Image (spheres, rainbow, N blue to C red):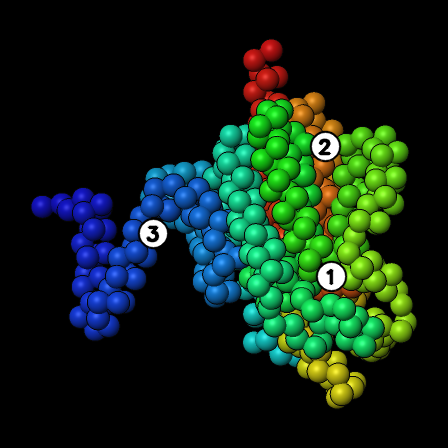
């Protein structure tokens, strides 16, 4: 008697749950049932896992988010075996492949390989998610639904941040130069535990929200999107993150250039006029950008100077991929500054994987921008044009923010970065497919 494979799978899952119940009790059994149901649902349709991950990852422990994103590529491969689904390697594989190769090599050869493994795993999870997106989201409708879920998640994050302004939250002393900012009592951080990290997240999400809002033709929907986008703007304002504001400024500049340069004529007077309506605390934070009196600025400058020494001493291959080998090395130069990263993405990457590694990373970033511009922003389809402009602005914004923060350090920011990359590649793949179908019909 031949037992069908599906029946074998059912018996296997039943045995698995029975063992869990027998040895670990009901609580773990219930968790196992949920896990098995989730596994079956995602095997049935990987998009269920993609959408769920995009919605909940900011609110989950980092380890759970890591497993969710990392597993998405695995599910695509499992479906290819079980259901003979075909999968494709995404475009622009050379720059990503080079960056991945350097990251793997400098993990193996790191001064602290186990420390480097942490960052390698986080970025591998992001790449796994990108791979799953490009092979599972097949058309514009599905892409738009995914982006909508992604932005709904951001709205919840933003609402929580705004709520914190009214309820008050504990503010750590290292977040602010208290002597020069005596009127500031709250900096919101939502689910990210640090206002600067929340700002990194919002710098990537706000331009995408603006792109969706810009494209929407229905006035009712546009009004709803405007309100939601306004909440995100308010939230980043309440972070009082100067780096976040600079990054958002870069993003706004890029969006205007790509959409309509005539908007500069409106943006300049609106921007100047808007300054008069800003709270005093915000104005003071803006005016303190670049101030040598502000201790947080002088602290960063000192970190950059020491990081340059690290780079000079390890310019060929760096000290090893990830923040842990960098932190260990940095603290051999000065023991009175127990830092975690260089507060500059480009210095950090150069210190971690060398000057050549920084070049490869910049090649990846600039190639992605060029690829998105040619295939999305230049598209005759307004949806891709405005979404593409928002995505390009997201990348430029976080690169601008990277001048004063390291955005590839916190797990949920790494995940957000790779999801943005995944949206870019998926949108391009769908747009090319639609163009090919139009050509074939004609």
Q: Quadrant of residue 168?
A: bottom right
Residue 59 spot, x, y in % from top left? 49, 59
Q: Position of residue 164 (x, y in %)?
A: 59, 61
Q: Residue furthest right?
A: 292
**From what the image shows, is residue 327 above or below residue 224?**
below
Circle 3: element type: helix
Say what secondary structure mark 2 lies in.
helix
Question: To which residue does mark 3 refer?
Answer: 39
Identify which residue, 251 or 415, lies in the foreground: 251
The correct choice, above or below, for 420 with respect to 352 in the image is above
Query: Is there CB contact under 8 Å for labels 2 and 3?
Result: no
Q: Which residue is mark 2?
A: 377
**How far apart are labels 3 and 1 at the CA level?**
40 Å
**Which of these two is toward me, 70 or 266?**
266
**Circle 1 residue:** 241
Query: Circle 3: is it few (<14), some (14-19), or many (20+) Cα within 10 Å?
Result: some
**Disc 3 vs disc 1: which is toward the camera?**
1
- Please name whichever residue, 164 or 408, is drawn nearer the observer in this view of the structure: 164
Q: Residue furthest left?
A: 1
Residue at position x 80%, y 49% in the image: 277
Residue at 57%, 30% in the rendered image: 221
Instruction: Tell me: 391 left or right of 120.
Output: right
- The residue located at (76%, 39%) in the rendering is 255
Return the disc, 2 or 3, that comes first in the chain's sequence: 3
């Amino acid at each position: 008697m031949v037992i069908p494979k599906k029946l074998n799978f059912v018996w296997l899952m039943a045995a698995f749950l029975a063992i869990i119940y027998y040895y670990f009790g009901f609580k773990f059994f219930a968790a196992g049932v949920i896990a098995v149901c989730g596994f079956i649902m995602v095997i049935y349709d990987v998009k269920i896992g993609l959408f769920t991950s995009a919605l909940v990852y900011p609110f989950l422990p980092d380890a759970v988010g890591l497993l969710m994103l990392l597993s998405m590529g695995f599910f695509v491969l499992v479906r290819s075996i079980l259901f003979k689904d075909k999968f494709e390697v995404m475009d622009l594989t050379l720059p990503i492949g080079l960056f991945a190769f350097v990251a793997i090599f400098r993990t193996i050869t790191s001064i602290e390989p186990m420390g480097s493994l942490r960052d390698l795993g986080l970025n591998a999870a992001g790449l796994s998610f990108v791979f799953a997106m490009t092979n599972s989201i097949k058309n514009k409708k599905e892409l738009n639904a995914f982006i909508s879920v992604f932005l709904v998640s951001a709205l919840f994050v933003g609402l929580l941040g705004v709520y914190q302004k009214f309820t008050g939250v504990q503010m750590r002393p290292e977040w602010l130069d208290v002597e020069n900012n005596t009127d500031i009592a709250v900096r919101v951080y939502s689910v990210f535990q640090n206002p600067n990290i929340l700002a990194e997240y919002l710098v990537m999400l706000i331009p995408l929200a603006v792109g969706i809002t810009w494209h929407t033709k229905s006035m009712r929907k546009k009004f709803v999107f405007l309100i939601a986008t306004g909440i995100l703007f308010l939230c980043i304002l309440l972070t009082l993150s100067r780096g976040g504001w600079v990054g958002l400024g870069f993003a706004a500049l890029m969006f205007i250039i790509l959409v309509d340069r005539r908007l500069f004529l409106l943006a300049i007077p609106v921007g100047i006029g808007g300054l008069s309506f800003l709270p005093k605390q915000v104005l003071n934070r803006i005016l303190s950008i670049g101030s040598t009196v502000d201790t947080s600025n002088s602290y960063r400058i000192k970190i950059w100077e020491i990081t340059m020494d690290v780079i000079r001493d390890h310019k060929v291959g760096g000290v090893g991929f990830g923040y842990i080998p960098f932190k260990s090395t940095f603290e051999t130069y000065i023991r009175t500054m127990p830092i975690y990263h260089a507060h500059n993405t480009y210095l950090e990457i150069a210190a971690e994987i060398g000057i050549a590694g920084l070049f490869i990373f910049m090649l990846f970033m600039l190639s992605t921008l060029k690829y998105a511009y040619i295939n999305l922003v230049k598209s005759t389809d307004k949806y891709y044009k405005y979404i593409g402009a928002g995505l390009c602005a997201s990348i430029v914004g976080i690169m601008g923010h990277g001048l004063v923060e390291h955005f590839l350090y916190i797990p949920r920011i790494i995940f957000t970065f790779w999801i943005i990359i995944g949206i870019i590649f998926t949108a391009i793949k769908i747009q090319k497919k639609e163009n090919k179908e139009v050509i074939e019909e004609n």
